[in-house]
């Protein structure tokens, strides 16, 4: 009975959380200049630069701020990218 309870907890709680975390990491790895994003604090901005651990956002004309990659909650609109990069990003999300 206890094993069944742990099995249900795994499929109902742990596995979906792992999937969301993988999707968020893939989205953060795929950030590129020109993407319009929202931070976890609700700030909208356009990506102007990307480092290993940080993202440079332009929040107003001439105003740039630096954020940690995990602080990016979602991408509102993606910048136009060549077809090769789009295919590679799609493969990274599937993994």
Image: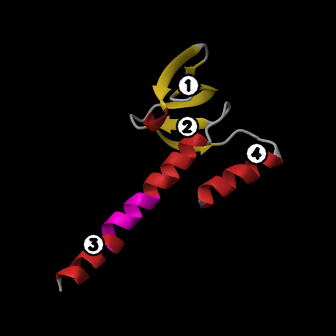
The residue positioned 66% from the left and 42% from the top of the image is: 78
Tag 4 secondary structure:
helix
Residue 24 part of the magenta-drawn span: no
Q: Nearer the viewer, mark 3 or mark 2?
A: 3
Looking at the rendering, which quadrant does residue 60 occupy?
Answer: top right
What separation in Å lies between label 3 and label 2 (alpha carbons)? Answer: 33 Å
Pair 2/4: label in front = 4
Helix, strand, or loop for circle 3?
helix
Q: Look at 56% across and 46% down and name the residue there.
A: 27
Instruction: Reply above or below: 22 against 63.
Output: below
Please tell me which residue is depicted at 45% across the width and 37% down the height of the picture.
Answer: 70
Q: Specify the label residue 57 is tagged with.
A: 1
Q: Earlier in the sequence, mark 3 or mark 2?
A: 3
Of all residues, the one furthest to the front in this rendering is 3
Reading the image, the residue beneath label 4 is: 85
For residue 56, side relative to residue 34 (left or right) = left
Label 2 or label 4, whichever comes before in sequence order: 2
Image coords of residue 79 (percent x, y): 71, 38
* Lower position in the chain sequence, tag 4 or tag 3: 3
For the stretch drawn in magenta, the main secondary structure is helix
In whole angstroms, how far apart are the C-alphas of marks 1 and 4?
Answer: 21 Å
Residue 85, compared with residue 48, is above or below; it is: below
Q: Are marks 2 and 1 in contact (CB under 8 Å)?
A: yes
Residue at the extreme top of the image, as rendered: 62
Q: Earlier in the sequence, mark 2 or mark 1?
A: 2
Residue beneath disc 2: 37
Range of the magenta residues?
12-19
The extreme bottom residue here reads 1
**Residue 95 x %, y %:** 59, 59
Q: Give neighbour class at mark 3: few <14, some 14-19, many 20+ (Cα, 10 Å).
A: few
Disc sitting over residue 9 in the figure: 3
């Amino acid at each position: 009975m206890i094993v069944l309870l742990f099995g249900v907890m795994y499929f109902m709680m742990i596995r979906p959380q792992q999937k969301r975390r993988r999707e968020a990491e893939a989205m953060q790895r795929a950030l590129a200049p020109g993407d319009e994003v929202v931070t976890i604090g609700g700030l909208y901005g356009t990506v102007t630069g990307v480092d290993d651990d940080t993202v440079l956002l332009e929040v107003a004309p001439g105003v740039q701020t630096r954020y940690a990659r995990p602080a990016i909650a979602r991408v509102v609109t993606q910048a136009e990218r060549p077809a090769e990069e789009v295919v590679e990003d799609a493969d990274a999300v599937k993994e």
